[in-house]
Amino acid sequence: MANYWLCKQEPSTYNIDKLQKEKTTTWDGVHNNLALKHINQMKKGDLALFYHSGDEKQIVGIMQIISDAYPNPKEKNKRYVVVDVKYKKRLNRPVTLDEIKGNRMFADWELVRISRLSVMPVSSKIWSEIIRISQK
């Protein structure tokens, strides 16, 4: 069974439009220990929500993890790992952080509790609710 994740990126650095155009990319630049732990747990076939951070603060699309974690070839330190991702689709409409914070179901989710965390797990219950909200 696939696991679900959320990956944040500042849209001025890399965004859903660029991923859609390029089709695949390496998800890199993560140095936070907890976020690295999550990347290490990702498996080929998992799905991830693409979150635009910064001024936007909204979930905009879905990516598929297309590799297991491996050391970032651009870094000397092997503990900095990356995964390769593939564009899957855009959400019917973005789901904003304000909407998420206003929904009790998300109260214990890392996105609400640990705002600086750039990669986090998503339970199947939360995943389904995000998809449901995006289709309203």
Image (cartoon, rainbow, N blue to C red):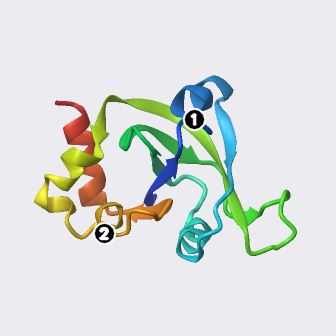
Image vertical order of residue 73 relative to residue 37, above or below:
above
In the displayed structure image, the side of residue 61 where residue 22 appears, left or right: right
Horizontal arrangement in the rendering, residue 23 relative to residue 79 (left or right)? left
First in sequence: mark 1 vs mark 2 = 1
Of the 4 image quadrants, the one containing the C terminus is top left
Residue 16 is situated, as x and y percent measured from the top left of the image, at 52, 32
Residue at the image position 22 percent from the left and 51 percent from the top: 100
Question: Given the image, on which type of amino acid does mark 1 rest?
Answer: Ser
Determine which of the numbered discs, if any, sits on residue 113 in the image: 2
Please, is residue 134 above or below residue 113 in the view? above
List the residue tagged with mark 1. 12
**Nearer the observer, disc 1 or disc 2?**
1
Instruction: Pinpoint residue 113: horizontal percent, then vertical percent.
Output: 31, 69
Identify the disc placed on residue 104.
Answer: none
- Dot 2, crowdedness within 10 Å: few (<14), some or many (≥20)? few
Quadrant location, the N terminus = bottom left
Q: Residues within 10 Å of mark 1 (few under 14, many from 20)?
A: few
Determine the image quadrant of residue 75.
bottom right
Look at the picture and state if 48 lies above or below 17. below
Residue 71: which quarter of the image? bottom right
Q: Secondary structure at mark 2?
A: helix
Is 6 positioned to the left or the right of 100 in the image? right
Amino acid on which disc 2 is placed: Arg
What is the x, y in percent for residue 128? 25, 49
Q: Secondary structure at mark 1?
A: loop
> Is residue 111 left or right of 32 when viewed as pictured?
left
Q: Residue at x 28, y 39 (%)?
A: 95
Residue at the image point whose x is 64% and y is 30% from the top: 23
Residue 79 image point, x, y percent? 74, 75
